[in-house]
Structures are given as C-alpha cells and as structure tokens.
Amino acid sequence: QQQVKQSPQSLIVQKGGISIINCAYENTAFDYFPWYQQFPGKGPALLIAIRPDVSEKKEGRFTISFNKSAKQFSLHIMDSQPGDSATYFCAASMQRGAQKLVFGQGTRLTINP
Amino acid sequence: NAGVMQNPRHLVRRRGQEARLRCSPMKGHSHVYWYRQLPEEGLKFMVYLQKENIIDESGMPKERFSAEFPKEGPSILRIQQVVRGDSAAYFCASSGPLAESSYEQYFGPGTRLTVT
C-alpha cells in the first residue's frame, strides 16, 4: 500500500513533442505529490508538486494532472527539449509532505534533437 | 542560500570498514531525511531526523546503520562493517518548519559509496 508505480520505464520523444509520465498510488492518506528531475551523477531536483485538492498545476512547460478518484497523477512536458533528457521520479508523502517520500521507480526520458 | 551540502561526494571503503556520510541542511531547515539509491533504481527512504531526535527510522536496516542529527553540526549517517551490498548513492534531503509552504524536500548532490 506504500508503493507508487511509475510508467513507462523509459521514453523517447522527438524535440518539440509532449512527454507524458504516469504514476499510480494506493494509499489514500498520501496528500502531497512531487516530481523530481535527476541528471546523471546529480541529486534529484524538485520540479513541481501538487496537492489532492486541485486537479492540475502548471509551471512553465511542466504540468501535473491529478485524478483523485483513480489515484493517478501524471507529468506532462510540453515542447520537450534535449536539455529535458534526464530521469524523472514521481513521489508521494503524507501529512503535507512532512513525512518520508515514497518514490516511483523512475522514467528515463530521452529527447531526440 | 546555499543548498544541501553532502560530503564526501565519493567514498571508497573496503569490506569491514566504517563509512561516515555527512549532510548539512539548507539554511533555516531543521528536518533531515536520508535516502538510498541503488544503481538503476529509485530512491528508498531510510531515516527522518530533527535536531537531536530520530522521528522515523522505518527504512533503516536493523544492523550496522545508524544516524544522528546533533544540536550543532551536520547530520551523520554511519555504516559499520560495510559489505558490497552497501554500495549505492546516499542522498540527504532537508525541509523547513512544518508550515504551509515549507514541506518541500530539497536534495543534496549525494555521496557515492563504493565497497571493494
């Protein structure tokens, strides 16, 4: 019940296209859902996060869509660029993020020029 | 503001030695979390600490691993008698006070531990 399942494991998108990564969770007590971007040899960087009281959040080219009834959330990267090539992790936590993050398995995104 | 700092960035230990990993949280942050990342895998929670207190250690192996966050100085993750299976990247994250906008966890660059 603590798991967060992420798909796909890897994704190749053409430059300018839309990258979509999906996550699903079971624990309805989760109330904070961040996405992290990680480049090789670096630490994860917080990209964008959402709370279950909204269905969508947009920051620049990055959008989180959240479906509370389906217990699913997704990251959309619009106008994908080669510099977006990285590994993306979804995560979830309880009590407004003050507790441990449970991470998905990660998606390795490659943007072809 | 300086970000989360971790040192060393790379650490090589022989089997049976001790490894000490240090983490200095972001300025103003009083919550520290340690995560472990095995090659080609996601991050797994290990322990959550506040100053002088362990809040949640549900992800820590029962033996050889310990963590502390003293009143003064960095948080330390200690691994005694390391084995090859301990080889991984260890990340520290910090967050601010439990206020509305301070729940984000910010990660350091990690310590890559190699056990030979």
Image (cartoon, rainbow, N blue to C red):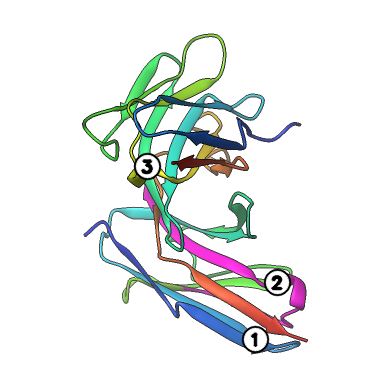
- Are the residues under badges 3 and 1 in a single subunit? no
Which one is in front, A69 or B25? Answer: B25
How crowded is the residue under tag 1: few (<14 C-alpha within 10 Å), some, or many (20+)? some
Quarter of the image that includes the C terminus of chain A:
bottom right
Q: Position of residue B2 (x, y in %)?
A: 74, 31
Residue A97 in sight from this viewpoint: no
Q: Which subunit holds the residue at mark 1?
A: A
Same chain? Circles 2 and 3? no
For the residues bearing labels 1 and 2, Cβ distance under 8 angstroms: no
Q: Amino acid at mark 2?
A: Asp
Looking at the rendered structure, the secondary structure element under dot 3 is helix
Residue B62 lies in magenta, yes or no? Answer: no
| Contact check, label 2 and label 3, Cβ < 8 Å | no
Disc 1 secondary structure class: loop
Nearer the observer, B103 or A91: A91
Amino acid marked by disc 1: Ile
- Per the rendered image, the range of residues in magenta is A74-96
The answer for which chain carries disc 3 is B
Classed neighbour count for the residue bearing mark 3: other residues with Cα under 10 Å, few (<14), some (14–19), many (≥20): some
User: Label 3 belongs to which residue?
Assistant: B86
Q: Quadrant of the N terminus of chain A?
A: bottom left
Left or right: where B36 falls relative to B56 = right
Residue denoted by label 2 = A84
Q: Secondary structure at mark 2?
A: helix
Mark 1 vs mark 2, CA separation in Å: 11 Å
Q: Nearer the viewer, residue B98 or A82?
A: A82
* Quadrant of residue B14 within the rendered picture: top left
Please give left or right for residue A46 compared with residue A74 in the image: right
Callouts 1 and 2 in the same chain:
yes
* Residue occupying the point 41% across, 13% down: B52
The residue under label 1 is: A18
Q: Give the chain letter at badge 2.
A: A
